[in-house]
Image (cartoon, rainbow, N blue to C red):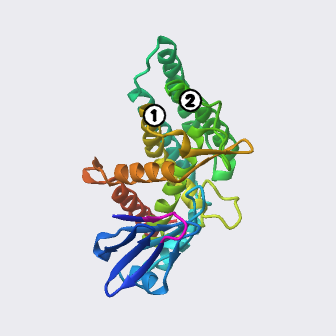
Amino acid sequence: MHIVLNSYGTSLQREGGRFVVFTSDGKDYIIPGQVRTITMSKGAKVSSDAILLAIEHEIDLLFVDGMGAPKGRVWSVKYGSIATIRKNQLEFIFNPKAVDWVKQLLAYKMDTQIALLLAMDPETEESKNLLQRAINALEDHKQKLLQLEGEVVADIAPSVRGWEGAASRRYFQAISAVLPKGYQFSGRSQNPATDAFNALLNYGYGMLYGKVEGALIKAGIDPYVGIFHRDDYNRPVLVFDVIERYRVWIDYVVIQLCRQEVFPEECFVDRNGAIWLEGLGKRILIQSVNDYLAEVVPFNNNERSRAVHIQLYAHQLARFFQNSSL
């Protein structure tokens, strides 16, 4: 279960050994053992006793902004890290192995994007042709990326960004073509979005940032030491690296919701040309993303929920750093 408190006046407190959620409709009691994460946004309140109960049960408590992106978190001191992991993580940045790691990461991202486009069912021949051209372009960009050579990531970073950016533009152009007219868009827009699709996508990515960051922390990895994304001051840049593996999950959820046209007009608000997701829209998207991440799927001979697969990858990455002979 995921507790999400994003309404003004909602509060989370503790009574005995249980959480109690107070809303305008009354109160609900929740056993800590049923809770995986707690997410709180502006206007919601939490007591120190409830925070301590979350810590006792190693429940991730995340504070998010209006776009669903993490702004702060409270976690258990049991989420420890040994020095070898952090030391090797830092040294890995300047190792030739990091070049291959970055190339394989972004090639994997492009593979997932291609797979999603292949799963689309375009209604017109024009859309079908556009999808196929986008798939061909992504395959070409991926091969050019894999052929890049350098001693350190900085040697290939400009070219990588160029091929990744070109692939992204073709990918989202194709996605727009298969959406209902009211959700079509001219390109990616962030902070804030300028259309409904990007408003949904930004909020979904914000949710995913929080989950990836939490997985890295639990695995003992420093989320602020990135490999490809290395230049942002005071940002959890390794999260920006690892999330590339999973962005397509959010893409898929948002695409399906838009194609089913489940969002009424009141889910979005226009503020001076910026489109923001509102209460009902957030509730629909949050529930849909959490349901999708809770679905059990096979991966690397393991059948686990998608959320657990993120955690397993984080532990795998920690072992990689710990055992790397640099």
Tell me what residue is drawn at x 32 percent, y 76 percent: 32
SS class, disc 1 = loop
SS class, disc 2 = helix
In the visual, does 286 lie left or right of 149? left
Nearest the eye: 91 or 40: 40
Q: Amino acid at mark 2?
A: Gly
Tell me what residue is drawn at x 57 percent, y 32 percent: 172
Nearest the eye: 57 or 181: 181
Which quarter of the picture shows residue 227?
A: bottom right
Q: Amino acid at mark 1?
A: Glu
Residue 306 place in picture, x, y as percent: 35, 53
Can residue 122 be seen at all in this image of the molecule?
yes
In the visual, does 47 lie left or right of 315? right
Q: Which residues are magenta?
A: 4-10
Which label is found at residue 261? 1
Point out the tag, 2 or 1, that comes first from the N-terminus. 2
Which quarter of the picture shows residue 241?
A: bottom right
Residue 104 place in picture, x, y as percent: 49, 45
How many residues crowd around disc 1 within 10 Å: few (fewer than 14), some, or many (20 or more)?
few
Which quarter of the picture shows residue 223?
A: bottom right
Q: Is residue 6 magenta?
A: yes
**In the rendered image, which residue does mark 2 sit on?**
182
Q: Residue furthest right?
A: 272
Marks 2 and 1, Cα distance to the nearest angstrom? 9 Å
Residue 196 place in picture, x, y as percent: 58, 39
Which label is found at residue 152? none
